[in-house]
Amino acid sequence: MAKCTCALRLQGENRAVIYGDKRRITVDSPWFCNWEVRVQLDGQDKPESHPVQTDRDLYVYEIESFASELRGRPIGAREVGMRFDDTLGNMKALDWWRAEIGLAYEGDRKTL
């Protein structure tokens, strides 16, 4: 079971929490991970902190996956699991949402 909240005009909490029978895992700012994951047992005063170790920035994995897919190579097990068609679909949905609320950025341009 999952509970997700998203909004364009609402500032919500930016964290992911996974609840288990006796503990929970918390990731603050899951899009960037802040290089730490916390695990807390029920009844424990303080969570255990586990550093996230990676040799590259988070977005490097996405860029490499995208470039590989454009070259016809399948997405690897350690790479982002979102295919090009899914990414394009998400971008279309985000463009539609922005148009609905009249949000535009300086870098946007209208198609003729």
Image: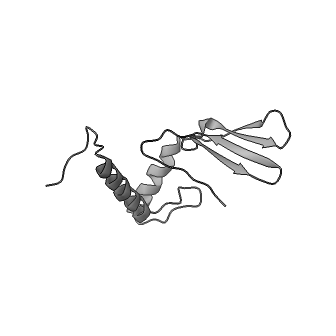
Outermost residue toward the top in this view: 46
Q: Is residue 37 left or right of residue 61?
A: right
Quadrant where the C terminus lies? Answer: bottom left
Instruction: Give 53 or 12, whichever is nearer the viewer.
Output: 12
Q: Kindly tell me whether residue 71 is visible in this rendering.
A: no
Dividing the picture into quadrants, the one containing residue 41 is top right
Q: Is residue 21 left or right of residue 108?
A: right
Q: Residue at x 63, y 58 (%)?
A: 2
Mark yes or no: residue 1 visible. Answer: yes
Percent across and percent down for residue 104 are 28, 42
Q: How many marks?
A: 0
The colour scheme applied to this rendered structure is one colour
> Residue 78 appears at what percent x and percent y?
59, 56
Does residue 38 appear to the left or right of 87 in the view shown?
right
Image spot of residue 40 (x, y percent) = 79, 41
Q: Is residue 46 above or below residue 98?
A: above
Q: Residue at x 83, y 33 (%)?
A: 45
Q: Residue furthest left?
A: 112
In the rendered image, residue 70, in percent from the top left (x then y), is placed at 38, 61
| Quarter of the rendering containing residue 43 | top right
Q: Residue at x 19, y 50 (%)?
A: 110
Q: Residue at x 48, y 45 (%)?
A: 60
Along the line of sight, the residue nearer the viewer: 56 or 9: 9
The answer to whether 36 is drawn above or below residue 8 in the figure is above
Instruction: Specify the quadrant that holds the N terminus.
Output: bottom right
